Image: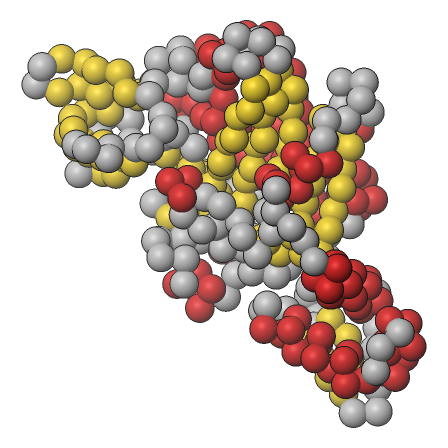
């Protein structure tokens, strides 16, 4: 079990409290902030510098104090819930926080909600966000939507084949309601725009292969990043601001994601991926194209023929059509 020191809890509480005070967008003096936090002005200044190091823009005016930079929209569970469909609102529990190591870890630590309710966690910033194949998922403060859901499933892990693909489809549908167009899906679970990555999905499954299990569904969406932040990702990437050519509310993004994911999980629980296969193939970025599939020990080149009813990739090679499942594999256009 990972040990968490009392000092780190206090530091985290101070950061959360400081951001809560600044969230109103008004100027607050260092003295005022210190009084609310119970610390010195010097300690407040150090915390403000830490926020800037996380990439959060702050306005500082002599005689007035500090405030969050203009155009910054913090996540708010009440605002997120205002975007929820009427039939979804009663089925979900939404929790937001400023900083956490990983929303996947956070939602699992909170545990399943009662009464068939699906729990969702969002964070302004993850210090140890995870991507597929052991990669780090970058989430600059206030610039992305990092969201995780905890879903209970009683049919065993075998019934979850194709779920990551279906989640990618749910992301596309959510973003289309917000004005995004020309989105594509890269097998098994990336959302692309003009060949650049907009969103990634990571599923972590725990439990019985044939009985009760729980699925942590994590996703990270780039909402508005600087050119420097996009370049630091290490692969061609894009954000929703550039896709839509306008600012998009992060709370609206979160709300629509929860809507489409909740509806998808209801359907997936009834019929699995086969219900979503045809729609997924309509968004397939590589269908009919020459691609190379790379696994840990080999690579295979062929023509992408879509996916089967379990979400397996159909690859046509000189020896016929072969099916490849997810896991530690990567796909790229030849």
Q: Quadrant of the C terminus?
A: top left
* Vertical order, 233 against 86 (above or below): below
Q: Nearer the viewer, residue 257 or 328?
A: 328
* Residue drawn at 71 percent across, 75 percent down: 47
Residue found at x 52% / y 61% = 225
Q: 62 or 118: which is nearer to us? A: 118
Q: Of all residues shown, which one is farthest toward the bottom? A: 62
The mark tally for this picture is 0
Q: Relative to 187, is 106 above or below?
A: below
Q: Left of 327 or right of it: where is 125?
A: right
Q: Nearer the viewer, residue 287 or 161?
A: 161
What x and y, as percent, mark residue 55? 58, 69
Snapshot quadrant of residue 178: top right
Where is residue 206 drawn, in percent x and y?
55, 24
Which quadrant holds the N terminus? top right
- Residue 50 in the figure: left or right of residue 221: right
Q: In the rendered view, does 296 fall on the left or right side of 134?
A: left
Q: Quadrant of residue 72?
A: bottom right
User: Which percent across, then down, holds residue 190?
Assistant: 42, 37
Residue 80: name its quadrant: top right
Q: Residue at x 45, y 44 (%)?
A: 131
Can residue 257 be seen in the rendering of this structure? yes
**Coordinates of residue 160 in the picture (x, y in percent):** 50, 16
Q: Is residue 197 left or right of residue 79?
A: left
Query: Looking at the image, can residue 276 be seen?
Result: no
Residue drawn where x is 66% and y is 78% of the image: 49
Residue sitting at the far left: 318
Colour setting: secondary structure
């Amino acid at each position: 079990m990972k040990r968490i020191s009392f000092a780190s809890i206090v530091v985290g509480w101070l950061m959360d409290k400081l951001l809560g005070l600044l969230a109103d967008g008004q100027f607050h003096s260092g003295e005022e902030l210190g009084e609310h936090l119970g610390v010195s002005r010097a300690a407040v200044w150090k915390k403000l510098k830490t926020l800037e190091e996380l990439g959060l823009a702050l306005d500082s005016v002599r005689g007035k104090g500090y405030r969050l930079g203009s155009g910054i929209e913090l996540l708010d569970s009440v605002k997120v819930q205002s975007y929820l469909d009427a039939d979804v609102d009663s089925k979900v529990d939404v929790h937001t926080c400023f900083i956490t190591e990983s929303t996947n870890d956070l939602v699992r630590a909170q545990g399943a909600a009662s009464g068939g309710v699906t729990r969702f966690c969002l964070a302004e910033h993850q210090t140890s966000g995870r991507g597929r194949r052991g990669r780090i998922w970058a989430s600059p403060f206030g610039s992305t939507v990092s969201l995780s859901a905890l879903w209970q499933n009683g049919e065993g892990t075998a019934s979850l084949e194709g779920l990551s693909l279906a989640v990618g489809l749910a992301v596309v549908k959510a973003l289309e309601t917000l004005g995004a167009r020309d989105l594509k899906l890269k097998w098994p679970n990336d959302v692309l725009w003009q060949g650049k990555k907009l969103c990634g999905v990571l599923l972590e499954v725990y439990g019985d292969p044939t009985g009760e299990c729980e699925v942590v569904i994590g996703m990270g969406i780039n909402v508005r990043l600087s050119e420097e932040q996009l370049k630091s990702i290490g692969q061609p990437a894009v954000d929703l601001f550039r896709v839509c050519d306008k600012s998009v509310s992060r709370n609206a993004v979160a709300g629509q994601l929860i809507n489409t994911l909740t509806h998808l999980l209801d359907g997936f629980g009834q019929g699995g991926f086969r219900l979503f296969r045809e729609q997924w193939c309509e968004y397939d970025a590589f269908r009919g194209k020459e691609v190379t599939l790379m696994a840990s020990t080999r690579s295979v080149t062929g023509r992408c023929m879509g996916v089967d009813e379990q979400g397996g990739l159909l690859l046509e090679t000189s020896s016929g059509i072969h099916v490849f499942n997810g896991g530690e594999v990567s796909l790229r256009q030849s």
